């Protein structure tokens, strides 16, 4: 991994050393990488004797509830007044796992006015200018948690990483790489995982809590998605699942229940692109995963107001669920024909 401008590390360390009240913010609908980075960092800062509050824009999946410090996370959309006061009283704000204010939804309006110094630590490409005063962006990193650990080591703060913080960081790497099955071809990723293991984390327990701790309803929803809803587009080597609000309600959907569903279709021989369409109140959320050289991020950016990594991207549509799926079929053929897929 390469933080090209080493002066960024120096500024990061200086700002952290000279701050006492810090606020850490993950993106909306935080996943394992976002919450792992936020809680990993908050545990480290508290070990250093600092006050560190994690404010999440909204609720996070229940399978992350085992992380140390999770009970102290403040949910912005349920505690707006308290959240705004913590931000106003802080002397440093750190954004993790996002690079545009739009990724924190209504919280973004707070930071359009707030003047507290902000640091961004993120691994997504094409960060928006002025998201933070100090922007540490390394798209080559497998995850923000990997980047965070590397940054801490470069800043001479490795000894401040407790076992509890290491567990959160490991969880972020595992969830953002599908247990090292994608976005994880760099040797540096494995060296960091080895370092975390040396800190005494229980990797088997972490995997159990994240990947093998499903509710009965979630497993029934997965069965429905695979057995009834999954469709294949053979000519374009793709497969997709589309889930309506009614279907989610039928299976007592909770945040995080569809985590990993989009990866399932990539297990099918010949499939290069997998898509998951999830109907929300006012839009359709879309997740893409790809292999064999298909640029999921370019496809998402071109047609679905999204972006992300080469093999893992997201987008959205303001059309109905059925209209979104039909558009997907049309533009997928257009994209494949134009780019030789």
Image (cartoon, rainbow, N blue to C red):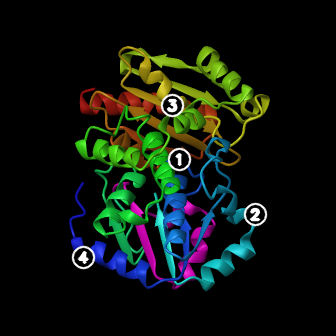
Q: Which element carries disc 1, helix, strand or loop?
A: helix
| Residue at 40% across, 44% down | 197
Cα–Cα gap, marks 1 and 3: 16 Å
Q: Which residue position is annotated with label 2? A: 78
Q: Which residue position is annotated with label 3? A: 262
* Quadrant the C terminus occupies: top left
| Residue at 36% across, 31% down | 334
Q: Is residue 237 left or right of residue 209?
A: left
Q: Is residue 301 above or below residue 24?
A: above
Q: Nearer the viewer, residue 163 or 82?
A: 163
Is tag 1's residue or tag 3's residue first in the polypeptide sequence? 1
Label ID, residue 223: none
Q: Which residue position is annotated with label 4? A: 7
Dots 1, 4 in contact, CB < 8 A: no
Dots 3, 4 in contact, CB < 8 A: no
Q: Nearer the viewer, residue 283 or 114?
A: 114
Is tag 2's residue or tag 4's residue first in the polypeptide sequence? 4
Q: Is residue 41 left or right of residue 243?
A: left
Is tag 1's residue or tag 4's residue first in the polypeptide sequence? 4
Q: Which residues are magenta?
A: 99-125
Question: Mark 2, mark 4: which one is toward the viewer?
Answer: 4
Residue 302, x across and y down, in percent? 38, 45
Q: Is residue 58 left or right of residue 36?
A: right
Is tag 2's residue or tag 3's residue first in the polypeptide sequence? 2
Cα–Cα gap, marks 1 and 4: 29 Å
Q: Is residue 123 magenta?
A: yes
Dots 2, 1 in contact, CB < 8 A: no
Cα–Cα gap, marks 2 and 3: 29 Å
């Amino acid at each position: 991994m390469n933080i090209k401008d080493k002066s960024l590390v120096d500024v990061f360390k200086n700002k952290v050393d000279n701050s006492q009240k810090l606020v850490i913010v993950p993106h909306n609908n935080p996943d394992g990488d976002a919450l792992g980075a936020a809680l990993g960092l908050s545990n480290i800062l508290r070990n250093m004797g600092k006050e560190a509050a994690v404010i999440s824009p909204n609720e996070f999946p229940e399978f992350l509830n085992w992380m140390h410090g999770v009970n102290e996370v403040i949910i912005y959309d349920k505690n707006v007044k308290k959240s705004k006061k913590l931000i106003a009283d802080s002397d440093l704000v750190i954004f993790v796992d996002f690079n545009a204010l739009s990724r924190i939804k209504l919280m973004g309006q707070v930071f359009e006015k707030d003047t507290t110094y902000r640091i961004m630590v993120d691994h997504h490409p094409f960060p928006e200018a002025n998201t933070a005063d100090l922007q540490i962006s390394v798209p080559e990193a497998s995850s923000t948690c990997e980047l965070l650990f590397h940054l801490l080591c470069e800043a001479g703060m490795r000894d401040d990483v407790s076992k509890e913080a290491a567990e959160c960081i490991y969880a972020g790497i595992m969830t953002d790489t599908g247990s090292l099955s994608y976005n994880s071809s760099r040797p540096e990723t494995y060296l960091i995982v080895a370092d975390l293991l040396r800190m005494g984390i229980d990797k088997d327990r972490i995997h159990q809590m994240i990947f093998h701790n499903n509710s009965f309803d979630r497993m029934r929803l997965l069965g429905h998605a695979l057995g009834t809803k999954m469709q294949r587009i053979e000519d374009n080597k793709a497969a997709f699942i589309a889930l309506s609000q009614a279907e989610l309600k039928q299976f007592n959907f909770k945040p995080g229940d569809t985590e990993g569903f989009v990866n399932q279709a990539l297990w099918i021989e010949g499939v290069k692109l997998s898509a998951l369409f999830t109907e929300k109140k006012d839009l359709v959320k879309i997740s893409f995963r790809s292999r064999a050289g298909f640029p999921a991020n370019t496809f998402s950016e071109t047609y679905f107001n999204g972006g992300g990594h080469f093999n893992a991207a997201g987008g959205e549509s303001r059309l109905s669920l059925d209209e979104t799926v039909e558009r997907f079929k049309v533009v997928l053929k257009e994209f494949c024909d134009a780019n030789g897929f």
